[in-house]
């Protein structure tokens, strides 16, 4: 097995799929555009959903990328040996091109040939079949052929009946039901299909508390999932039936940190080279010890993970700053949890900007937006850490008011100290013990469970719509957003530039650069322009071209690296305009074919978002 650095794993993966005819695309923003169903980009497939659903991608049918991702559903688990909020996801994609045979063959080739993994340490899982779809024998046969090349037996096993062996002739392929080896659909209906997961055998001894027999998907830790190949070959209908898809796709995902850990022969992602460099910063600058005390190690991991995630979120091309709502609340929570742990370890000086500087140094070459926004990152982290220092002081004063003289703090009051004042629960317990009292931990646990449920709901998103939604409502609102953008430029001037947008089935939300509040007359004029374009029933179509060609033709939009060398440019044609069009904008779609399909347009709110950025919310009606 080759001991590769994290940067080398990235490079080898992308170069391999380039050789296989894939276009390498840049990572999309961590802040999803036009998708209210999630707060952050959570997987490599997330920005590509429209293309998996049939929209043509400007870069072709074979794609590969490294997507930066944030998942916060398990934020309270971070600190163990495997959970992280920020991570990088390697992926290769077939949009109606190659399918199972090439995907599986290339997976095996990359792992065994380029990464140098011993084939005898690889196990795979496939879909076992049920009343909706038959067993994935196609994948089983392809895997058997791959293992056979190395003289390894390819017997098919089943969890609970067969146990993996270190010997080459034991079962290598295991079948599992839908909950293990099936992806999707993203909603109630839509594309879905079986997947095949690839596991690395660490050869650790099975922990029998997880059952009498081991298997690849066992929770005992012997096997580590390193890659997943999803085969989108079915469409789930409203009636619950599964029918074959016209466009079959391949969607794969490999966690970069997890793969690096395996190739570097370390037990946790925090022992990989890049994360170790961040840990060394804490050790060298703040005198923190790592690797000697499990409690201290957990705190170090939380600090490194959370500040890395916050740095990426603030330094993103659509960067989010700490606040009390939505995405900003998550950023604030990450920073404050890291600072709490730092204080707990005795770090009382400003910590987060120093660690963020190390993050930018290590990741800036791969993600240049971090370097470009470094001053903003440092400033926001410094402000938030200093603000939280005062908050902790206030929390101490509040504790003194809250503590009952009879020696008991209710769980509800303890939780208010934790959630409102950011006061660590351990500190509350310690202070109460010093007074000879106790905390009602049962009621605190109840309050904390409610808090976790709300956090998970917030992280998952609560709105209908999103990238996977090609409904008539969202399609119309996508086009209305283009009309609004151009109308704003007509009324307020060309300095208007899009900062972000968000579309549900009920409304559109559009953020744009403008230094002052719009007047009622300006709002009315913008609304009238859009409705006039709708009334005239203008043609809407698109062409694929290079970014430079799009700019030369007068297209507007977010010119980002994510588009690659070719983009889709949607035009609302208008022969009465000297340019020959009303609107020309870079966008992935989908859109209506004529503006008359939109009905009527109404601005329902205009408000400030931040300094120099305004927001409009609007709806369509019949």
Image (cartoon, grey):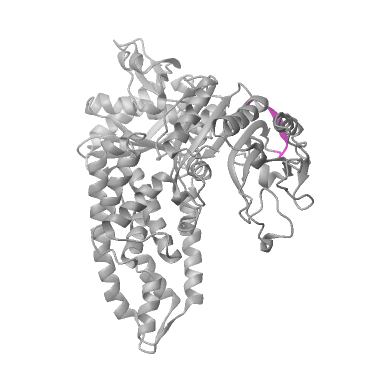
Q: Position of residue 91 (x, y in %)?
A: 52, 33
* 56 w.r.t. 107: above or below: above
Q: Depth check: 571 or 437 in front?
A: 437
* 578 w.r.t. 465: above or below: above
Q: Position of residue 604 (x, y in %)?
A: 35, 40
* 467 w.r.t. 179: above or below: above
Residue 389 within the magenta-colored segment of the rendering: no
Which quadrant is home to the N terminus? top right
Is residue 97 something that shows in the picture? Answer: yes
Residue occupying the point 74% across, 56% down: 213
Is residue 328 something that shows in the picture? Answer: no
Q: Is residue 267 left or right of residue 498?
A: right
Q: Position of residue 223 (x, y in %)?
A: 63, 49
Q: Which residues are magenta?
A: 239-248
Residue 247 within the magenta-colored segment of the rendering: yes
Give the quarter of the image for residue 236: top right
Residue occupying the point 66% across, 60% down: 207
Residue occupying the point 24% across, 37% down: 520
Residue occupying the point 27% across, 61% down: 388
Give the quarter of the image for residue 489: top left
Q: Position of residue 500 (x, y in %)?
A: 35, 35
Q: How many marks?
A: 0
């Amino acid at each position: 097995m080759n001991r590769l650095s994290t940067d080398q794993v990235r490079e080898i993966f992308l170069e391999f799929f380039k050789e296989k005819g894939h276009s390498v695309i840049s990572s999309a923003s961590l802040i999803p555009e036009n998708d209210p169903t999630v707060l952050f980009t959570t997987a490599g497939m997330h920005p590509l959903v429209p293309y998996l659903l049939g929209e043509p991608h400007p870069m072709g049918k074979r794609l590969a990328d490294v997507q930066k991702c944030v998942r916060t559903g398990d934020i309270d688990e971070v600190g163990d040996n495997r959970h992280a909020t920020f991570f990088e996801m390697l992926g290769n994609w077939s949009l109606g091109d190659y399918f199972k045979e090439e995907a599986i063959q290339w997976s095996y080739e990359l792992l065994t040939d380029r990464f140098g993994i011993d084939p005898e340490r690889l196990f795979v899982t496939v879909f076992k079949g049920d009343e909706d779809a038959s067993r994935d024998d196609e994948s089983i046969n392809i895997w058997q052929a791959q293992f056979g090349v190395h003289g390894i037996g390819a017997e098919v096993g089943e969890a609970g009946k067969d146990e993996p062996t270190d010997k080459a002739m034991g079962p290598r392929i295991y079948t599992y039901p839908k909950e293990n080896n099936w992806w999707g659909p993203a909603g109630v209906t839509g594309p879905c299909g079986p997947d095949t997961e690839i596991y690395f055998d660490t050869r650790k001894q099975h922990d029998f508390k997880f059952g009498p027999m081991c298997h690849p998907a066992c929770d005992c830790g012997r096997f580590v999932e390193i890659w997943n190949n999803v085969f989108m070959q079915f469409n789930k209908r409203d009636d619950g039936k599964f029918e074959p898809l016209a466009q079959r796709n391949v969607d794969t995902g490999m966690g970069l940190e997890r793969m690096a850990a395996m190739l570097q022969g370390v037990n946790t992602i925090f022992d990989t080279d890049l994360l170790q460099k961040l840990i060394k910063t804490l050790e060298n600058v703040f005198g923190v010890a790592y690797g000697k005390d499990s409690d201290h190690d957990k705190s170090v991991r939380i600090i490194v993970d959370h500040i890395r995630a916050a740095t990426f979120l603030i330094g993103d091309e659509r960067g989010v700053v700490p606040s009390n709502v939505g995405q900003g609340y998550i950023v604030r929570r990450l920073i404050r949890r890291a600072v709490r742990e730092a204080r707990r370890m005795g770090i009382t000086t400003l910590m987060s900007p120093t660690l963020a500087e190390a993050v930018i140094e290590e990741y800036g070459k791969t993600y240049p937006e971090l370097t470009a926004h470094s001053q903003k990152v440092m400033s926001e982290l410094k402000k938030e850490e200093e603000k939280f220092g005062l908050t902790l002081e206030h929390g101490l004063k509040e504790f003194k008011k809250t503590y009952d003289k009879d020696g008991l703090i209710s769980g509800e009051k303890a939780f208010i100290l934790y959630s409102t004042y950011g006061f660590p629960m351990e500190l509350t317990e310690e202070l109460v013990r010093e007074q000879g009292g106790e905390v009602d931990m049962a009621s605190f646990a109840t309050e904390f469970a409610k808090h976790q449920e709300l956090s998970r709901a917030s992280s998952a998103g609560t709105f209908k719509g999103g990238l996977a939604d090609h409904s008539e409502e969202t399609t119309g609102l996508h086009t209305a957003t283009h009309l609004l953008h151009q109308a704003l430029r007509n009324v307020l001037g060309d300095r208007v530039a899009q900062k972000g947008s968000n579309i549900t089935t009920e409304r559109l939300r559009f953020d744009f650069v403008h230094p002052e509040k719009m007047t009622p007359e300006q709002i009315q004029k913008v609304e009238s322009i859009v409705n006039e374009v709708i009334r005239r029933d203008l043609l809407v179509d698109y062409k694929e071209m290079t970014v430079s060609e799009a700019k030369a033709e007068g297209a507007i939009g977010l010119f980002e690296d994510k588009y690659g060398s070719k983009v889709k440019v949607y035009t609302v044609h208008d022969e009465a305009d000297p340019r020959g069009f009303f609107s020309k904008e870079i966008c992935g779609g989908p859109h209506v074919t004529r503006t008359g399909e939109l009905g009527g347009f109404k601005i329902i709110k205009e408000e400030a978002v931040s300094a120099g950025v305004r927001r409009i919310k609007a709806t369509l009606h019949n």
